[in-house]
Amino acid sequence: MREDDPLLRPYHLRRLRLANRIVSTSHEPAYSEDGLPKGRYRRYHVEKARGGVGLTMIGGSAVVSRDSPPAFGNLQLHRDEIVPWLRELTDAVHEHGTAVMCQVTHLGRRSSNFTGDWLPLVHPSPQREPAHRSVPKIAEPWDLERILADYVSAAQRCVAAGLDGIELQSYGHLLDSFLSPRTNPDGGSLEERMAFPRRVITAVRAAVGPEFIVGIRMALDESCAGGLPLAEGLAAARCYLADGIDFLSTIKGTIDSDAALARVIPPMGAPSAPFLEFTAAVKRELGIPVMHAARIADVATARHAVAEGMLDLVGMTRAHLADPHLVAKIRAGQEDRIRPCVGASYCLDAIYSDGAAKCVHNPATGREGTLPHELSPIHGAPRRIVVVGAGPAGLEAARVLGGRGHEVVLFEAGQEPGGQLLLAARSPRRRDLLGIVDWRVREAKQAGVRLRFGMLAEPEDIRAERPDTVILATGGSPARAFLGEGGELIEDTWDVLSGGTQAAGDVLVYDEHGANQALDAAEVLANAGARVRYATPERALAPDVGAMIAPGYLKVFAEHGVTTTLAERLVAVRRAEGRLRARLRSEYAEHEHEITVDRVVTERGTLPNDELYFALLPESANLGEVDHTALLAGTEQHIVANPAGEFALFRIGDAVTSRNIHAAVLDALRLCTAIGPCEAKKGAPSQ
């Protein structure tokens, strides 16, 4: 550990001493239960406290009023019963020397009229919010009076729960909607527009007393036509500070559309820490404690920001979803062992697709009650385990098994690890996915796993190792056989991403999968000069690509004139005059038509590479069967369907069926953490 590491220096926010400069800033993982921070929510934040973070902030927009219905699992601060749950979380976090604060807000129009109590949303104007699609009513004076009282009551509940402070939210929600001339066009002068936010700040400060910390996370420059300019943002911030604000968390931009949100919270493919200079300028101008978080994913960038005085507290929020023990590893001089945030934004997108945040390659995040972040050693004789395949599933299995103390050998047919991630990373915007591979390879090597690349494992190679357990992570291959006519004429997205097809002429990219792969191929082709037409039988473009990642693809589509066709299914391809005629059928009408192109590229997910699995199946003790009850409970598999079997046999990831990265590593982690020692050793394996 560097004794003078700027990141590890304590920091004082008035009376509050923070152990270091690293913060998990306010965000909402949607782990609440009935709007309350119960067990899952508490365990998630306690894990980061165990990992050494200086400050963890909960309630990424905890709501103060009933007409601010939760849009993404928000905590409900308007309920008295939240206090004991907050107290339990706060006490548990404090036990590890970490401070805890809660973000407090009224969502304004950033929710839905058609959820919760079905009350109308309020806003200073009737403008519809694009992201959540609700039309609000114009707030009346009595609305503002009751909301002001709700802010006060919510803050008092946080004091009663023993929190160290609160953070008022002022970007994309109600407070800033009054301040911004874009959302409050009839609001008058700056003084008039900031009147209601100032009333809230003044009332909250009076209610919580002078010692309780009150901060604000605020858009100081909306960077859009008609939006709040920096000069007005700074002027408002000065008034807010005079009214009782203790620290400022900086935001640049707006969040009311997918494109705007992706600029404020940059995903993979975006520059690192794009708003550091902006934040440094704000800090110089205002001279107050400043916090900031926006794609500060690596320790070196965070250290630079603190060392250069660009900010006082550095938000590494998504980095903590990837590795909640980030600070502990810095202290231990093990920065190279920090699980990297790759910027996939699955943590955000999964909230809307699956109901809760998930790290794309740390399946223990949000599952702290059943899955470990740190591996525990086995007690007893290690098993001999063979893993086949070095994609994310196989590498995770090898990492976990080796880290627990088993004797592990991994076979990979390719000359380098990565599996399908090697293809995905060919897309410039997704190259950071290689961090998922690189980290696991390092961890597996450190655990003593034997990695054997360039070896296509056959059954005899498996037998020669005399394994107790065999785990097949052999992945999948493109599902191409679906056309009644012309199947031999099509290519797939793997051909494009591997460089195996020419990017010229007119290309139809047909997508039945709905994830990143077809968009990656379309982007590569368009950037190389092809005229691309994207078609899908879905009623929306790539429905499995989330709101954080989609804007980058749509930018490419717009720049290169990529056309999109929805709700049409590819049914046939034939040759005609040296080109291809692709027949498309409407999903909603008895109608077919043909288009002429030079190439047809298809994406339909994968089919399992399962030949090795079925070859080994008769020799296995469990005949491939998985006890789902044991798997989900985190206990060992004990099925013996074939007493003469030589080993337990499992398959994981796309070797089972076509899924995503998170599913692959989840398969591996929950299976392999439960594999305990063996009872008897076998003879030495072949070398």
Image: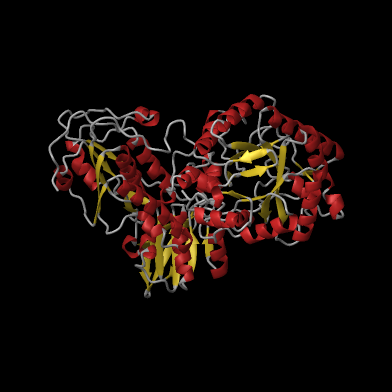
Would you place residue 359 above or below residue 377 in this image?
below
Residue at (84, 54) in percent of width and height? 190
Residue at (70, 27) in percent of width and height? 160
- Please say which color scheme the image uses: secondary structure
Counting from the top left corner in percent of width and height, residue 278 is at 66, 60
Would you place residue 161 above or below residue 456 in this image?
above
Q: Residue furthest front?
A: 3
Counting from the top left corner in percent of width and height, residue 673 is at 35, 35
Counting from the top left corner in percent of width and height, residue 671 is at 34, 36
Q: Is residue 285 left or right of residue 606?
A: right
Can residue 131 be seen here? The reply is yes
Q: In this view, does 270 lie to the left or right of 77?
A: left
User: In the image shown, does 427 or 636 lie closer to the viewer?
Assistant: 636
Residue 506 in which image quadrant: bottom left
Residue 202 in which image quadrant: top right
User: In the image shown, does 394 or 567 lie closer to the viewer?
Assistant: 394
Can residue 125 be seen here? The reply is no
